[in-house]
Image (spheres, grey):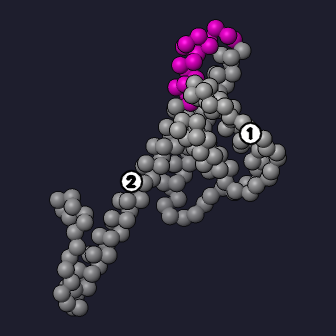
């Protein structure tokens, strides 16, 4: 293990003090492996969460550079969308920092919100990408109140819709 191979196990040959020490070592090693897998998954999830708003910002900026900046109305709309995506990035980073502080305790913010507003916000954010991919987004919904973590629900639905557009 000292050389970096954390998949080591110690063979337990007795039930004396040394055997119990070997068993404790194996349990500790299992916990280290589990924590390492969870850390890797966390990094992968965090990277995916950060990639979505960055992709939206990139598309919006490229559209502005490509000529949309000449149309003041469209340019202002895109700048507002970029501002919202920066806010979204800030929220994601804040949530990541909050998660690191929780260290195993469960403290998810629960609120009542309208799911319809989430869908409309997602459609607005993903419309520039859908136009580039030549994919139409259609939503026929109504006001539905839900209790839960609004940001997590928004992220989950956003990822589903974004992946549907891309793939």
Residue 33: x and y in percent read 33, 64
Taking depth in this image into account, of 69 and 4 the one nearest to the observer is 69
Q: Is residue 71 located in the magenta-colored stretch of the structure?
A: yes
Residue 82 shows up from this direction: no
Taking depth in this image into account, of 104 and 75 the one nearest to the observer is 75
Residue 122 shows up from this direction: yes
Taking depth in this image into account, of 1 and 17 the one nearest to the observer is 1
Instruction: Give above or below for 140 relative to 99.
Output: above
Query: In the rendered image, which quarter is residue 2 located in?
Result: bottom left
Distance from label 1 to label 2 (Cα)? 36 Å
Instruction: Give above or below for 120 relative to 7.
Output: above
Instruction: Identify the residue under disc 2.
Output: 40
Query: In the rendered image, which quarter is residue 26 located in?
Result: bottom left
Residue 155: x and y in percent read 60, 45
Element assignment for label 1: loop
Check if mark 1's residue and mark 2's residue have beta carbons within 8 Å.
Answer: no
Looking at this rendering, what residue extends furthest in the top direction?
70
Q: Of circles 1 and 2, which is in front? A: 1
State the residue at coordinates (53%, 59%). Answer: 102
Residue 99: x and y in percent read 52, 54
Instruction: Identify the residue under disc 1.
Output: 139
Is residue 51 left or right of 25 when viewed as pictured? right
Quarter containing the N terminus: bottom left
Residue 115: x and y in percent read 75, 48
State the residue at coordinates (48%, 46%). Answer: 46
Instruction: Give the crowd class for mark 2: few <14, some 14-19, many >=20 residues within 10 Å.
Output: few
Assign the magenta stretch its main secondary structure. helix
- The region drawn magenta spans 56-72
Is residue 115 left or right of 62 when viewed as pictured? right
């Amino acid at each position: 293990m000292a050389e970096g191979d954390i998949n080591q196990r110690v063979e337990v040959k007795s039930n004396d003090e040394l055997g119990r020490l070997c068993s404790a070592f194996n349990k500790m090693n299992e916990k280290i492996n589990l924590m390492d897998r969870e850390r890797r998954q966390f990094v992968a999830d965090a990277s995916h969460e950060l990639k979505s708003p960055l992709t939206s910002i990139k598309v919006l900026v490229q559209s502005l550079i490509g000529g949309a900046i000449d149309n003041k109305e469209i340019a202002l709309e895109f700048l507002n969308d970029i501002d919202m995506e920066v806010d979204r990035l800030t929220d994601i980073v804040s949530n990541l920092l909050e998660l690191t502080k929780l260290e195993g305790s469960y403290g998810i913010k629960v609120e009542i919100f309208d799911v319809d507003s989430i869908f409309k916000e997602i459609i607005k954010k993903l419309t520039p990408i859908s136009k580039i991919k030549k994919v139409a987004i259609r939503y026929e919904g109504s006001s539905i109140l839900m209790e839960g973590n609004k940001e997590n629900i928004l992220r989950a639905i956003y990822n589903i819709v974004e992946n549907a557009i891309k793939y």
